[in-house]
Image: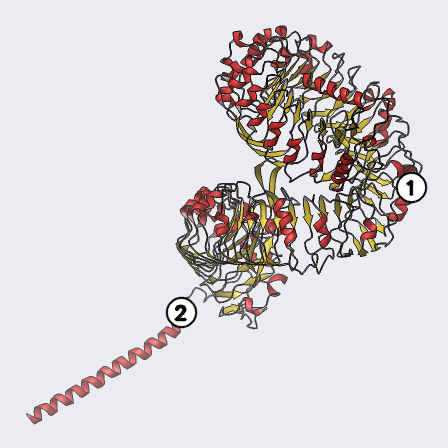
Amino acid sequence: MMRNPVGLKLMMFTVCLVMELVYGKEEVRCIEREREALLRFKAAIVDRYGMLSSWTTPHCCQWRGIRCSNLTGHILMLDLHGEFHNEISFNFYIEFSSERFISGEIHKSLMELRQLQYLNLSSNSFRDSNIPEFLGSLSNLRYLDLSSCGFDGKIPAQFGSLSHLKYLNLAYNFLEGPILRQLGNLSHLIYLDLRDNDLEGNIPSQLGNLSNLHELYIGGVGALKIGDGGQWLSNLISLTHLYLTSISNLYHSHSLPQMIGKLPKLRELSLFDCSLTDNFFLSLRPSILNFSTSLTVLDLSENTLMSTMIFQWVANFTPNLVELHLSHNLIEGSVPNHFGLAMSSLEQLDLFFNKFKVEVLQSFMNICTLKSLDMGKNSLNQSLSSILHNLSNACARNSLQELDLSSSQISGSFPNFSIFTTLKILDLSGNQLSGKIPESILPSRLESLSLLFNFLEGEIPKSFGNTCTLHSLDMSYNLLSGEFSLIFQHLSGCAKNVLQDLKLGGNNINGTFPDLSRFSNLKILDLSYNQLTGEIPEGNQLPSQLESLSIGSNFLEGGIPKSFGNACALRLLNMFNNSLRQEFPLIVHHLSGCARYSLESLDLGWNQINGTLPDLSIFSSLKILSLRKNKLNGEFPNDIQFPHQLEELYMQSNSLKGVLSDYQFANLSKLNSLDLSGNSLLSLTFTQNWVPPFQLRKVGLQSCILGPTFPKWLQTQNEFRDLDISNAGISYMVPKWFWTKLALRKWVSMNISCNSLHGIIPYFPTKNPYHSLILGSNQFEGPISPFLRSSILLDLSKNKFSGSLSFLCVGDPIGKLYQLDISNNNLSGQIPDCWSHFKSLAFLDLSQNQLSGKIPTSIGSLHDLQALFLRNNNLTYGIPFSLRHCTKLVMIDIAENNLSGSVPGWIGSKLGKLQYLSLRRNHFQGNLPLQICHLRNIQLLDLSLNSLSGRIPKCIKNFTSMAEKASSRRDYGYEVETKHLYISSQSYALNILLMWKGSQQMFKSIELLLLKSIDLSSNYFSEEIPEEIEILFELVSLNLSRNNLTGKIPSNIGKLTSLEFLDISRNQIIGSIPTSLAQIDRLSVLDLSHNHLVGEIPHSTQLQSFNVSSYEDNLNLCGPPLEKLCVYKVPPKEKKNETHKDDYSFFSREFYISMTFGFIISFWMAFGLTIFRKFYFLYNLADKCLY
């Protein structure tokens, strides 16, 4: 943004006055008391970049950053500002960065500098510390800059006493609480900058007392509001720059626009991210806008403007604008025709990320003074040639110097751009440009062209090489192909003498690496992620001015040629992820030409480089060295010397061994990142009270040998942000100083898991936020300290923590916690009902504890919850109805509890994203609800060991994920979008415990991706196995054992060709084994035992390879591998064209057999009747004789 900093001019006048006092003719000696104060200040500072190296001589007025009065000798100026310098190329990539800063503590000895007028400590590192209150006692201060230092806490009240202060900058810190009202007492203040802090509350009206204020910058991150309708603003009649950012209630204030409108000298106005709508500006009347002619810069970006009426308002009220910024709004529609005519001074128009259509482009291009137009991230939806045709008569084509049409859904081929006679920068990245690039003519003055992320094919045309002003060309991530040498030949016109930045990464460019020496001015070359092959020939030369060469992720072989070592300007060499196999000492030798003096960054990671570590001190400028994921081996040399400028060292995942001691790190005062992880034979053994010369931000020593005691040298490290000492053989109690240091830090990532650390974590009252705290797989015990819960990721699993979960409910709600894992501990009691405190929670694992009682209702308030693990506790009752609100759930594992009731139907109807559901070993009963079939994404369904009954629903065919092949993603992790400023997303991995091939196994990450399983075993399901199960082609495991299933095995079960595990034992299955089962060649576990199967086991190598137990207790089953042989009936011999006469005779064999039985029965009936009658006659005769 353009600025006309009146306040800065006055500040510079003050500085010049001080400088005039300093550089008098007489030599100035400083006052001894003040010199001693500076030395005490120096003693408390960590000065890794030697900013205070001159502070040794007797005359402190000659020290760097010190200026004294030549009249009194008092110190008037202390300027120790840090430097964070980024070198940006034409397309706004940061190619190189450098930094220079001090850290440590600001000592109170500065109070002795009572005549101090100028104090600048900006851009240094004082993170996690408060602004010293004693600075408020420096009553003569005119200039105070503490911006970008990492300060937190509140603005000291003592600052309200700095009555002479003219310049105050506290921006870009972590200051919290309200804005200090006493700042309104600083009547001489000209410049006040408080932006990008965590300040909250109403902006105090006392700021209206600052009648001399020229520049005011407030807002950014916190929750600041405008109080009293902003009446105080109207008193700032000298204000020229007003920047109000993210003021939460600004859009509600009806009087604020009028107050701003009363500022007659206002030149720059920014109301960035204040939720402003169109109505806010409709309420403004021209009569109240005193600044209408003075305003030159207006920034209304990141609001909710929707209508193009804003252009009419701007044209009517602020016609003298030079810059207009409206990016990140929702503006759409046509633009009034008179806008272009009215804006006679407009040079820069920023409309990035709106909803404009292509028609509005014509209106903007009719602004004849326009030099810069940003229409990126809009919906132009037209071919590029059509767009250019419609702009052929626009007057801005003769004034426009910068044009951004990136990510605007532009299609078609790349046309002729010669109509833009003044264009210098053109950005068409992120569109749908396609096809081969014709021999198009670029604008004659074009300096930078970006076409990255399109679909352009073929080669780069020769016309690009004939553009004699082209400094930067970015065609990364297209579909370019062809030989690399031919591409460079096409660029060898006059462009070869001016081209400085060439990016062609992410294409299909092949061939070998050619000689590039003809490109005399080329400074940056990126060819990474292509298909370059072979070895780089020794004779090939690099451009003499080349500073950055990136050829990573290709297929280059061999090593680095000596010619690379003769590139005297080379600062960055990136050859990661190739197939380099050269020994590292030889690589160092080849780079030991003049490049050893210039090289700042060397990345050779992810290759096959072997050998030992040589002396690296020859690289006098090297700041970053990455050798990760190679095959370095051998002993770490005791006398190795690293470059003394080294800031980042990455050598993880090699095979280095030996002992690292103080000596190897003695000269690394600037080291801030160290990662040696994965070298399991590498030991770090430092002397007892060693104080390292460095302050590390990143410590990566995972799987190195640090133990058995806790590394004491970490006590000296006060700036670490990322600490990983997991699996480092430490079996010791964590010292209290470590917990104290952690409790005082902010936004730390710490991993101390997989050791044998023990003890009780102490209680701290702090609530500092952390990125991740991973303490799993140790032996910590006792209650869990509440301060740990202020983390985005908290892993306390596999320890011995005991007591209740009450720590979760202590204090205010926590909005930052996304992942909580406290599984595998000794926690007991009920799960607390305070989950509404954790609105952002996405991953919750409380499994394998001793928790009891109900699953609390408030768990349903976790609307972002994706994974819920409550496995192996003593939970009772049912699944809470409120859980249906957790519609983002991907996994539910509540196996191995005492839950009861029916399986809720809403699991299927409401939780449509569910992929993994385990209710194993509970007491659920009743029928399986048909709604369960709505789980189209389900990959694992485990309902085993319950009391479920009824039939298996046929609609399981709707489990479409079980019929589809798994994704080929390499990294199988889930992500949740975070709402925190510093992290856009947080990923996590899933796991589940399953019965697999006879034993319980844990499946996680990529294994889960491949596992598709149904387990309904050990229930009371009845009726037939549904034939629809044959549709689930990708099913890997199916277990229906120990039920009451009847009927036959589905005949086409052989369609389940991915099946590795099949168990339908201990049911009432009848019929034969389908022959299709023999088609499943992956089957490794099969159990059909204890059923009523009959017939022969189908012949196949697979089915005969299983143990007899797979088929036992099927009485009528026969054939290998069973001992029981099948008895085959011998059929009669058949004769062609012959029919036996008795085949269809009535007197068949059966007839004669029946006749024989009939004759015998008839004979005995007749004979019996005759005997009976004879006996009956004799009986009657005797009766008559007797009577």
Residue highlighted by disc 1: 592
Above or below residue 1029? Residue 424 is above
* Secondary structure category for the residue under label 1: loop
Question: In the visual, does 259 lie left or right of 603?
Answer: left
* Secondary structure category for the residue under label 2: loop
Q: Would you call the spot at circle 2 few (<14 residues within 10 Å), some (14-19), or many (20 or more)? A: few
Circles 2 and 1: CB atoms closer than 8 Å: no
Q: Measured from the top left, where is residue 966 in percent x and y?
A: 60, 46
Residue furthest to the bottom? 1186
Q: Nearer the viewer, residue 73 or 82?
A: 73
Counting residues from the N terminus, which is met first, the one under dot 2 or under dot 1?
1
Which numbered mark, 2 or 1, is in the foreground of this view? 1
Quadrant in which the C terminus appears: bottom left
Q: Nearer the viewer, residue 1003 or 883?
A: 883
Residue type at mark 1: give it: Ser
Quadrant in which the N terminus appears: top right
Q: Measured from the top left, where is residue 422 in percent x and y?
A: 76, 12
CA separation, marks 2 and 1? 111 Å
Above or below residue 962? Residue 265 is above
Q: Measured from the top left, where is residue 762 in percent x and y?
A: 58, 53
The answer to whether any part of residue 529 appears in the image is no
Question: In the visual, does 1050 lie left or right of 364?
Answer: left
Q: Measured from the top left, where is residue 1036 in percent x and y?
A: 57, 54
Q: Would you call the spot at circle 1 few (<14 residues within 10 Å), some (14-19), or many (20 or more)? A: some
Residue type at mark 2: give it: Phe
Residue highlighted by disc 2: 1147
Question: In the visual, does 674 lie left or right of 769?
Answer: right
Question: In the visual, does 685 lie left or right of 331?
Answer: right
Above or below residue 1145? Residue 650 is above
